[in-house]
Image (spheres, grey):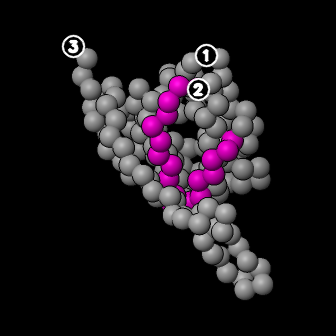
């Protein structure tokens, strides 16, 4: 009998827009609300990586895992592998090919999602890729993934 692990998580996002005439950030007028949510998911045994280094080369993305992912947590630690503070962002691709990086995680920020089936024809999320931006330093992240 397969063992299932329960993962409980909550997300929070405050969409903001910058108003240059006041030099301030405000709640995005198009969205008009803070976005929150939570979920409980049942998965196989989670895989945790305390320290994954992403090289300072946008052409070399790092895979979070070689299998289909149903749950993913990525935290940008804001440090290089040598423990030096780094302001590099981490970009995440969920398309299974590393072609489109639509999620940006700043230093100290994290991303969590329960991922459903892709509509790329395969019916699965083949892989999740991470990279730093062009010209940015290396970055270290923590990851937790489960299928």
Residue denoted by label 3: 1
Secondary structure beneath dot 2 equals loop
Q: Is residue 79 left or right of residue 26?
A: left
Quadrant of image for the N terminus: top left
| Residue at the extreme top | 1
Looking at the picture, how far across and down is residue 87, in whole percent?
63, 62
Residue that numbered label 2 is attached to: 118
Dot 1: element: loop
Question: What residue appears at the point 27 percent right and 31 percent down from the top-left corner?
Answer: 5
| Inter-mark Cα distance, 2 to 1 | 7 Å
Q: Residues within 10 Å of mark 1 (few under 14, many from 20)?
A: few
Dot in front, 3 or 1: 1
Indicate whether 28 appears above or below 60: below
Q: List x then y, in percent, for residue 71.
A: 44, 35
> In the picture, which quadrant includes the C terminus?
top left
Answer whether residue 43 is visible to the viewer in this image: yes
- Residue 82: quarter of image: bottom right
Q: Which of these two is toward me, 145 or 48?
A: 145
**Residue 104 counted in the magenta span:** yes
Q: Could you classify mark 2 by the number of other residues whose Cα lies within 10 Å: few (under 14), some (14-19), or many (20 or more)?
A: some
The label on residue 122 is 1
Alpha carbon separation for disc pair 2 and 3:
27 Å
Q: Is residue 110 left or right of residue 105?
A: left
| First to last magenta residue range | 101-118
Percent position of residue 92, x then y = 62, 42
**Residues under labels 3 and 1: Cα distance?**
27 Å
| Label 2 with label 1: CB-CB less than 8 Å | yes
């Amino acid at each position: 009998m397969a063992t299932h692990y329960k993962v409980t998580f909550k997300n929070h996002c405050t969409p903001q827009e910058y108003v240059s005439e006041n030099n301030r950030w405000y709640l995005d007028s198009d969205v008009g609300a803070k976005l929150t949510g939570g979920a409980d998911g049942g998965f196989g045994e989670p895989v945790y990586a305390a320290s994954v280094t992403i090289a300072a080369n946008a052409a070399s993305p790092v895979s979070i895992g070689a299998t289909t992912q149903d749950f993913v947590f990525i935290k940008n630690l804001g440090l290089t592998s040598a423990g030096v503070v780094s302001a590099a962002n981490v970009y995440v691709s969920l398309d299974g090919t590393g072609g489109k990086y639509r999620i940006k995680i700043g230093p100290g920020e994290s991303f969590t999602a329960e991922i459903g089936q892709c509509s790329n024809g395969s019916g699965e999320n083949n892989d999740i890729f991470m990279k730093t931006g062009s010209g940015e330093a290396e970055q270290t992240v923590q990851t937790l993934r489960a299928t």
